[in-house]
Image (tube, grey):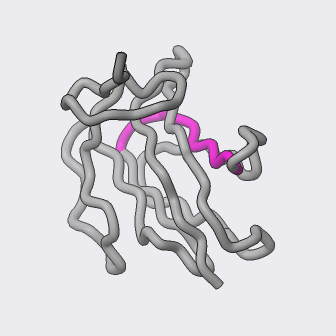
Amino acid sequence: MVKTDNLGRSCSWVGCDSVGYVYPVGIASPLPPPKEGELQVYPNPATNQLHITSNIQATFILYDLLGRAVRQVGLGSGTVQVSVLGLPAGTYFYQIINPQKQILQHDKLIVLH
């Protein structure tokens, strides 16, 4: 059985079947302000800083390929910068969760140096 998210895309990690993607991936410049309830994570790939624009209370958690949380930051209204300096170049995964611990968004993130 192939696991899919709510938009029908295949995925293989916990929680992926309950989340849709609400932002474009691979944008290297700032995006327009998010609509109500929308989250934006850019650029992807990231080199020095990752920008997360939100208009809701949530937590961003970045995981390495072994599932260890390597960055965690609270989100609110506005844009938060998360440094990826000090992280080895490679593939990471992130989740954005609300205060009720529901996954609002998740995806893969590439870090390049």
Q: In this view, does 100 lie to the left or right of 21?
A: right
Q: Is residue 4 left or right of residue 110?
A: left
Query: Which of the two residues, 31 or 94, is positioned nearer the viewer here?
Result: 94
Position of 102 relative to 19 (above/below): above
Position of 21 relative to 24 (above/below): above
Which residue is located at x 35 percent, y 54 percent? 40
Which residue is located at x 40 percent, y 34 percent? 11
Position of 26 relative to 10 (above/below): below
- As for residue 26 lying within the magenta part, the answer is no
> Magenta region: which residues?
55-64
Tally the marks. Answer: 0
Query: Which of the two residues, 66 or 52, is positioned nearer the viewer here?
Result: 66
- For residue 111, which quarter of the picture? bottom right
The quadrant of the image that shows the N terminus is top left
Point out the residue furthest to the bottom here. 113
- As for residue 61 lying within the magenta part, the answer is yes
Position of residue 69 measured from the top left corner of the image (x, y, whole percent): 74, 42
Which residue is located at x 67 percent, y 69 percent? 84
| Magenta span main SS | strand
Query: Which of the two residues, 40 or 79, is positioned nearer the viewer here?
Result: 40
Point out the residue furthest to the front here. 1
Which residue is located at x 37 percent, y 22 percent? 3
Position of residue 68 measured from the top left corner of the image (x, y, whole percent): 77, 41
Query: Which of the two residues, 106 or 36, is positioned nearer the viewer here?
Result: 106
Position of residue 94 measured from the top left corner of the image (x, y, whole percent): 55, 45
